[in-house]
């Protein structure tokens, strides 16, 4: 039997992740049955679960991928940019990302085993945010009267609030100025003064 190339395995894994993302977004975690996952990916359950141990591992892989993508944006442009991308619909698959994020939040509240597995993966975004804020602090562009850990928690809470706002289907067209205010609130006074001059 011929060996399957790594490129083929990677492409198959990508196919599974992309199809599953749409399936989880449409039906939620519980509603994404194996049959629906098969339909969404175009693959059999054997092919799907050859790459992922179970449905939860598949879902965690999607959530982890989203966290890594967000961490890249945070490292380059900050957590507020992640929020701006959500509002503008920019970035890859914003609707599916939102659905995955909401499902993660729900399962964190209701599933202790999932919470334990997710805890290992959830630090990526927090660490990226802290590192960026620390760099901004060292450059003199971040307010120095509030600890970086507190500012990190503040920005993460704003993100969660925005996700909830979007999940409720509330209007988001006018939230750009709100994010401007959030961004302004973490800047150093000197930077704020020079922007006003």
Image (cartoon, helix red, strand yellow):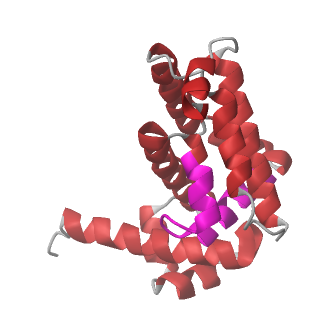
Q: Residue lying furthest front in this view?
A: 197
Q: Nearer the viewer, residue 27 or 78?
A: 78
Q: In the rendered view, tell whether residue 173 sits above or below residue 141.
A: below
Residue at x-position 44% and y-position 37%? 75
Q: Which residues are magenta?
A: 81-107
Residue 116 visible, this angle: no
- The picture places residue 76, in percent across and down from the top left corner, at 41, 41
What kind of secondary structure does the magenta stretch mostly adopt? helix
- The picture places residue 140, in percent across and down from the top left corner, at 49, 16
- The picture places residue 59, in percent across and down from the top left corner, at 60, 60
On the rendered structure, is 160 left or right of 62? right
Q: Picture quarter containing residue 97?
A: bottom right
- The picture places residue 3, in percent across and down from the top left corner, at 16, 69
Q: In the rendered view, tell whether residue 66 sits above or below residue 19.
A: above
Residue at x-position 58% and y-position 77%? 22
Q: Nearer the viewer, residue 52 or 15?
A: 15
Q: In the rendered view, tell whether residue 54 sits above or below residue 20.
A: above
On the rendered image, what quadrant is the C terminus found in?
A: top right
Does the stretch in magenta take in 56?
Answer: no
Q: In the rendered view, tell whether residue 104 sits above or below residue 3.
A: above
Residue 87 visible, this angle: yes
On the rendered structure, is 85 left or right of 177? left
Q: Residue lying furthest top in this view?
A: 145
Does the stretch in magenta take in 103?
Answer: yes
Residue at x-position 57% and y-position 19%? 190
Count of numbered marks: 0
On the rendered image, what quadrant is the N terminus found in?
A: bottom left
Residue at x-position 63% and y-position 20%? 189
């Amino acid at each position: 039997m011929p060996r399957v190339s790594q490129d083929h395995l990677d492409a198959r894994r990508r196919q599974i992740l992309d199809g599953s993302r749409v399936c989880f977004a449409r039906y939620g975690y519980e509603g994404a049955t194996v049959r629906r996952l098969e339909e969404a990916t175009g693959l059999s359950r054997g092919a799907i679960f050859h790459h992922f141990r179970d449905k939860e591992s598949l879902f965690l892989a999607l959530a982890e991928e989203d966290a890594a993508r967000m961490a890249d944006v945070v490292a380059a442009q900050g957590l507020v940019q992640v929020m701006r991308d959500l509002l503008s619909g920019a970035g890859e698959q914003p609707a599916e990302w939102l659905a995955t994020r909401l499902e993660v939040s729900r399962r964190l509240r209701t599933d202790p085993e999932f919470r334990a597995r997710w805890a290992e993966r959830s630090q990526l975004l927090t660490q990226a945010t802290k590192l960026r804020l620390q760099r901004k602090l060292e450059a003199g562009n971040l307010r120095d009267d509030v600890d970086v850990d507190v500012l990190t928690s503040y920005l993460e809470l704003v993100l969660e609030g925005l996700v909830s706002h979007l999940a409720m289907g509330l209007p988001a067209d006018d939230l750009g100025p709100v994010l401007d205010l959030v961004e302004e609130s973490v800047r150093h006074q000197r930077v704020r003064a020079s922007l006003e001059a």
